[in-house]
Amino acid sequence: QITLKESGPTLVKPTQTLTLTCTFSGFSLSTSGVGVGWIRQPPGKALEWLAHIYWTDDKRYSPSLQSRITITKDTSKNQVVFKMTNMDPVDAGTYYCARTYLYGDLVWGTGTTVTVAS
Amino acid sequence: NFMLTQPHSVSESPGKTVTISCTGSGGSIASNYVQWYQQRPGSVPTTVIYEDHDRPSGVPDRFSGSIDSSSNSASLTISGLKTEDEADYYCQSYDTRDHVVFGGGTKLTVL
């Protein structure tokens, strides 16, 4: 059974850096074809893909946010870490991590809600 | 840049059939698989169609997916509509740079 769970702060201040960790089980990020990504959803708005990391350690970023975000993996810990700098209230919402395999569907984590306020 | 465009909302009566479109631009929709997700309010998205037309176990066969290369679009069709089908639906695929691409979502109202 594949499970993913996001963890990190629920509240960050404007200009701070958000760091979220995705801890997963049921698969390995060293398996060919596997990727883990981050998606966010502001309240009442659409899903927005942010970043992805593949089993090769190749990384992909949303063009509109790539100057602010980084994604890394720790295969031995079954974790993927996402960082977004210079947080703003418009960055508030639910952040999901998700697994992909060979350009198929996303298997989603439960999501974590992030508020940006001073 | 490859983009997916969905209608903002659709509505239909219980028992009827509805089709939600997902039109690709900036690339061929047939180049990578298309997935469809259902998201009910306050819930995590779940897959209703993967790899263009396959259904995960547990998803009723009232849900079907298709690709039309001539119109560069994908479609999600739900037949025998039930009130429980009322949700937001998102199409998703990949672009040529291995970026994940989502459509803007379609709110389905069953009234």
Image: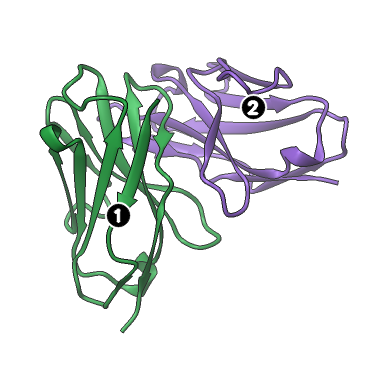
Chain colours: A green, B purple
Q: Position of residue A105 (x, y in %)?
A: 43, 26
Reading the image, the residue beneath label 1 is A7
Q: Position of residue B7 (x, y in %)?
A: 63, 43
State the residue at coordinates (46%, 23%): B29
Viewport quadrant of the N terminus of chain A:
top left
**Between B75 and A93, which is closer to the camera in this rendering?**
A93
Q: Amino acid at mark 1?
A: Ser
Q: Horizontal placement of A67 versus B32: left or right? A: left
CA separation in Å, label 1 and label 2: 33 Å
**Between A70 and A11, which is closer to the camera in this rendering?**
A11
**Residue A97 higher or lower than B17, as above or below:** below
Question: On the image, which quarter does residue A117 sit in?
Answer: bottom left
Reading the image, the residue beneath label 2 is B76
Q: Amino acid at mark 2?
A: Leu
Badge 2 density bin: few <14, some 14–19, many ≥20, Cα 10 Å: many
Q: Secondary structure at mark 2?
A: strand
State the residue at coordinates (34%, 28%): A100
State the residue at coordinates (64%, 27%): B76
